[in-house]
Amino acid sequence: MDRNPSPPSSEAEEEGDAVGNTVYSKHWLFSILTRLIEVISPEKTEPAGSPEGMRTELDEEMENDICKVWDMSMDEDVALFLQEFNAPDIFLGVFAKSKCPRLTEICVGILGNMACFQDICMSISKDENLGQVLLQRLCDSDSPTLLETSRLLLTCLSQPEVANVWVERIRENPSVYDCVCFIMSSSTNVELLVKVGEVVDKLFDLDEELMLNWIKNGTCRSVGPSVDDSPEELPDFKIVPCILEAAKQVRSDNPEGLDVYMHILQLLTTVDEGIQAIVQAPDGGKETWSLLYDLVCQELCQPDDPPIIVQEQKTVLASILSVLSAMFASQTEQEYAKMRKNMPLIGSLIRILQYMEGCGKRSVGNSKEPEQEETGRADINEEDFHLKILKDICCELLSNMLQELTKENTLEGLQQGHLNEQTCSCAFQNLLPLYFASVESFLEVLREADQTLADNLEKRFPSLKVHT
């Protein structure tokens, strides 16, 4: 059976029955809303045999029909019709009385479609009772319902007119933190993890105060309303381990999801409290560093990838390197940050810079096309902007790491192939003149490890020779 069957048309209905400019029937839609009210009406929930209100499954006909409404609600005229006939209030009754997860999922999904339209989204968002009940759905044990709830929240948070309403509502409901952390730390549903990650990413991007509250959370317990099907006895969650667990789940199956969770980590590092939450974990930040190190050195932008891969991975790389840079700057005394363990990372940073040089040449070549359209030029400018961000972050981390190299580290890097004349030239080309002191410091160490290579590099970069 199709999840959302084709909706019925009103071609055979009497004139004037069409919803707006659609071919959908007002009479049919109204009949479904009426049946939905009957499903949750008090007289239907009296205890007797198998009361309708206590059923955990929909009958096939009702499921088919309500799924048709779900599909139809993507049309603005239908969404306005549903709003006019108080569908949100009917759904509120469903959430309060129904024990059927599928019915709850569908009703939240319909609201999610309706919220795509600004006026309806504002109406839904300003309904305090509905807003509170929807947040409680984040504590649901049903993954499809959680997915639709997350989609609805993301839709509302993405509309500037109502985003602050939801941010404030979430800030005042500590239970949201626990429910979100529970999903990130325990779910294996990649689609759900990605959508929840997008919600967290949007929240942190919109409101630094909320992000700080969530960073500091973990010692105080929730005081929000309890939900019958919410996870019992939630553990004392910390935000960073939950983010890491979710990232591990999505890394293989969903590159976009990995991008989302890496950006959440990057947002944490924009405040001191966030950096401390990462590096003052019980393991001192080792788990975070290990995951990010492995992504850069083993999965992203690899030697057998074409240089253009950096275009596809530029945003996730920028997030990862930004977090690594923040950690390296504050935790150089940690064992995992010692240079003898991180020579492959230096090699990866230089490879990223090499691949960016290749992409830069390609963009310049494309921009010289005689009849290139304006949109094409805009795309290239955007590509250049994101590549510049990645380059700046990459150079900052590389310069800091080069300053920490000893003769022994450098010899190891030479032996392993991470350092040679080509890679060092690429590094110098990108680091100079901004990071002159770092390059000069590294050249002094390199001279002890390989005098010939140091001399060759001085010849290629005369500004260095003047200062020696």
Image: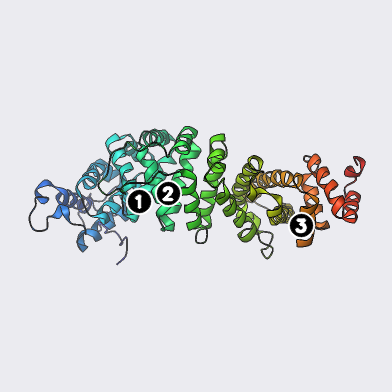
Per the image, label 2 sits on a secondary structure element best described as: helix
Helix, strand or loop status at disc 1: helix
Say which residue label 1 marks: 146
Q: Earlier in the sequence, mark 2 or mark 1?
A: 1
Residue closest to the far bottom: 1
Q: Residue 413 shows which numbered tag?
A: 3
Q: Amino acid at mark 1?
A: Leu
In this view, 306 is above or below 79 = below
Q: Quadrant of the C terminus?
A: top right
Report the Cα–Cα distance between label 3 and label 1.
48 Å
- Disc 3 vs disc 1: Cβ atoms closer than 8 Å? no
* First reached walking from the N terminus: tag 3 or tag 2: 2
Task: Residue under label 2, please give it.
Answer: 196
In this orientation, which residue lies closer to the viewer: 129 or 443?
443
Q: Mark 2 is on which residue type?
A: Val
2 and 1 marks in contact (CB < 8 Å): yes
Residue 321, horizontal then vertical, whole percent: 63, 48
**Distance between the alpha carbons at the discs numbered 3 and 2:** 41 Å
Residue drawn at 38 percent across, 39 percent down: 118
Q: Is residue 155 above or below residue 3?
A: above
